[in-house]
Amino acid sequence: MAFGSLDRHDDDTMSEINMTPLVDVMLVLLIIFMITMPVLTQQVPLDLPHANATARAKPAPALSLSLDAMDQLWLDGRRVSSAELGAQLRAAATHQPQPEVHLAADRNTRYERIAQTMALAQQAGLTHIAFVTQPDAAAK
């Protein structure tokens, strides 16, 4: 017979996999899992303790500490010397809760001066220091 002939013998072996039973089994398994998952994800019943929580106090205002390009210190818009800054930071460290120091430095300020200012705040007892930056224009 010709190669493309429609004449086939019944005793030829079938070389293709019948996917229908496989799909049926997978659908049955899917339905079983969909039914059993909500049963398995139940929460454990707990009797949790109750506590009276007080409202948080209003946080202390942040201190704005700036270093300009001329290495001058500015605290909340006022020019201060290093000695005055140390005294004011020690006084601020006694407040509860402690204020956060927002440190802004000019782009041309030496890192050494910034590190000295941070060390001064740490020696005064302040633990929360945040850096103020300008958002990048390309990121907008």
Image: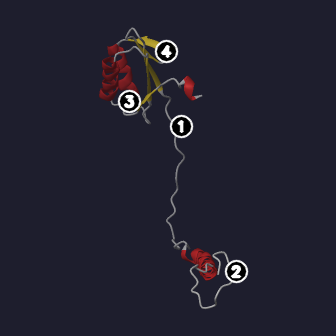
Determine which residue is flagged by label 4. 77
Q: Nearer the viewer, residue 13 or 73?
A: 13
Distance from Cα at disc 4 to Cα at disc 2? 95 Å
Q: Which mark is in front, 4 or 2?
A: 2
Q: Which label's residue is closer to the chain start, 3 or 4?
A: 4
Q: Which label's residue is closer to the chain start, 3 or 1?
A: 1
Distance from Cα at disc 4 to Cα at disc 1? 23 Å
Identity of the residue furthest to the right in this view: 6
Label placed on residue 58: 1
Q: What residue type is labelled 2?
A: Leu
Q: Contact, CB < 8 Å: mark 3 with mark 2?
A: no
Q: Which amino acid does label 4 sit on?
A: Gly
Q: Which label's residue is closer to the chain start, 1 or 2?
A: 2
Q: What residue type is labelled 1?
A: Lys
Q: Which of 44 and 39 is in front in this view?
A: 39
Determine which residue is flagged by label 2. 6
Find residue 95 and report its image quarter. top left
Q: Which residue is drawn at 58% across and 83% down?
A: 14
Label placed on residue 93: 3
Q: Which mark is in front, 1 or 2?
A: 2
Q: Contact, CB < 8 Å: mark 1 with mark 2?
A: no
**What is the quadrant of the C terminus in the image?**
top right
Q: Which mark is in front, 3 or 2?
A: 2
> Horizontal and vertical percent for residue 103?
43, 24
Q: Which amino acid does label 3 sit on?
A: Ala
